[in-house]
Amino acid sequence: MVVSAGRFFTAACALAGSAFALKALEVDGKDFVNSDTKERFQIIGVDYQPGGTDAVNTKSDPLTDSDACMRDAALMQRLGINTIRIYNIQPTLNHDKCVSIFGEAGIYLILDVNSPLPNGSLNRVEPWTTYDSAYFEQVFGVIEAFKNFENVLGFFAGNEVINEDATWLAPAYVRAVVRDMKDYIAKNAPRTIPVGYSAADVRNILTDTAHYFECEMSNSTNSRIDFFGLNSYSWCGDASYKSSGYDVLTEDFANATVPVFFSEYGCNAVTPRVFTEVQALYGEEMTQAFSGGLVYEWTQESNNYGLVKVNSTDVVTTLVDYDNLQAQFNKIDMARIEKSNTSQTSVKAETCSPSIITSGKFLNSWDLPATPSNVTDYIQSGLPNAPTGTAVTVSGGAISQTVYDYTGKKITGVEFKVLSGDQVNSPSGESSNSSSSSSSGSSTSTSSSSTGTSTSKNAASLNGPSVAMGGLGGLFMLIASLL
């Protein structure tokens, strides 16, 4: 039998497309888990918003510059990052190359659906004035742009909307946005994508905020969040588990029924940052309550939180904070934090009731606003004319930019590596000032192995260049099966 050129091409594309795809993550109780293996996933991440809020515009966003994405993905691989958070997205732009780059690097994305541009967010003081179809063109537009990528971990429906300045009704409107997003995803996306909320660390309303969003409503199950992020900067310098209040946070979220993680952390009141909180966050006590965290932030901006400094389009410097964070990440016991725990996945949500709210200043009613009629039309039929993203092929290799460490020493051999199979990037144990290209990251996987340090249940069966590189050997085997 002769294999047609079309069938040959289809077979080749199928192999190439499946060889590098990260497996989608899903929520199981208070854990993120691999959708295939059910292995627990802990976020080892960084907040990614090059240029900061000042750089937000309608013509570009952090996921439109593929050269910058490849540069940053390579440096994140060296650091051990497995997740990034992106705050401001322009949904009408093309993000295919950048999202694919991070996916091939073994890195998941958490995306905020809001924007500081007009019609891009809820007004926390008067949310009813912005809860309309114009706002949901931004929200649903982001979902459309990213719904087809397996390395999208989830969406944030809001960031610090609820604080002491917010109106009494703000929680109900945020929960309504969660409901509308989840309804849209259920109707228009190829898979369930988790939706969560990122909260400010306002201690007098923090637990009430979590309870309000994670409790179960008998008449609106889709409005419950899938995960809860906390922006916390209480561990400064060489603090301790108790002096930082981390012990209180662990106790507060010990009985959470959704995954909880730091959506921002890394106090800079003491510099350089030493990141000793990493050992607490990924230690035995806190991993029973938290699913890791995202360090604030990747690039050095005016607020002085950066891990790297972009000197120009061709030159970047890794700062001392990068080195210090890498040293702490390298101490994480990956095997322990990835173990599944039935007590984590068997939790059951509490019922929404005024009794679970402790503060008299926090809303204790779940009378959510009705979805606007035009928004209901979007949910039923999809957002009209919305661009939809799709994964593209990317290749590994040395990055084109020059990289220096904070002492001014040139770092050579920085490579972007395409990880094979469903490998997730993880800390490699290498020093950040290594000049060897072998320090370009590592991975964890349940089905394959690659260069660098990795943990695998079945690594031996898929080890070797034919699979790791997309695979001429694997391609010939696939073609042979068609004969």
Image: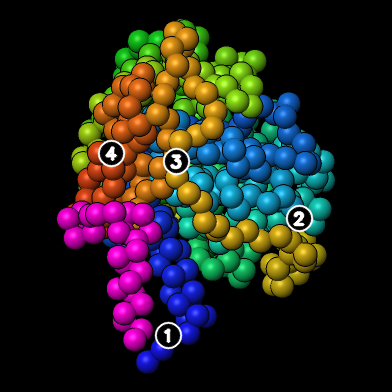
Q: Nearer the viewer, mark 4 or mark 1?
A: 1
Could you say which disc has been placed on residue 397 in the image? 3
420 sits to left or right of 155:
left
Measured in 3D between alpha carbons, the distance from the residue under mark 1 to the one under mark 3, in whole angstroms, is 33 Å
Measured in 3D between alpha carbons, the distance from the residue under mark 3 to the one under mark 2, in whole angstroms, is 38 Å
According to the image, label 4 marks what residue? 452
- How far from the left and from the top, in percent, is residue 254? 33, 38
How packed is label 3: few (under 14 Cα within 10 Å), some, or many (20 or more)?
A: some
Callout 3 secondary element: strand
Measured in 3D between alpha carbons, the distance from the residue under mark 2 to the one under mark 4, in whole angstroms, is 42 Å
How packed is label 4: few (under 14 Cα within 10 Å), some, or many (20 or more)?
A: many
Measured in 3D between alpha carbons, the distance from the residue under mark 4 to the one under mark 1, in whole angstroms, is 38 Å
According to the image, label 2 marks what residue? 137
Amino acid type, residue under disc 1 in the picture: Val
Q: Is residue 255 visible?
A: no
Amino acid type, residue under disc 2 in the picture: Glu
Callout 2 secondary element: helix
According to the image, label 1 marks what residue? 3
Which of the marked residues, 2 or 4, is nearer the chain's N terminus?
Answer: 2
Q: Is residue 310 above or below residue 375?
A: above
Q: Give the image quarter of residue 287.
A: top left
The reply to whether the C-beta atoms of the residues labelled 3 and 4 are less than 8 Å apart is: no
Measured in 3D between alpha carbons, the distance from the residue under mark 3 to the one under mark 4, in whole angstroms, is 15 Å
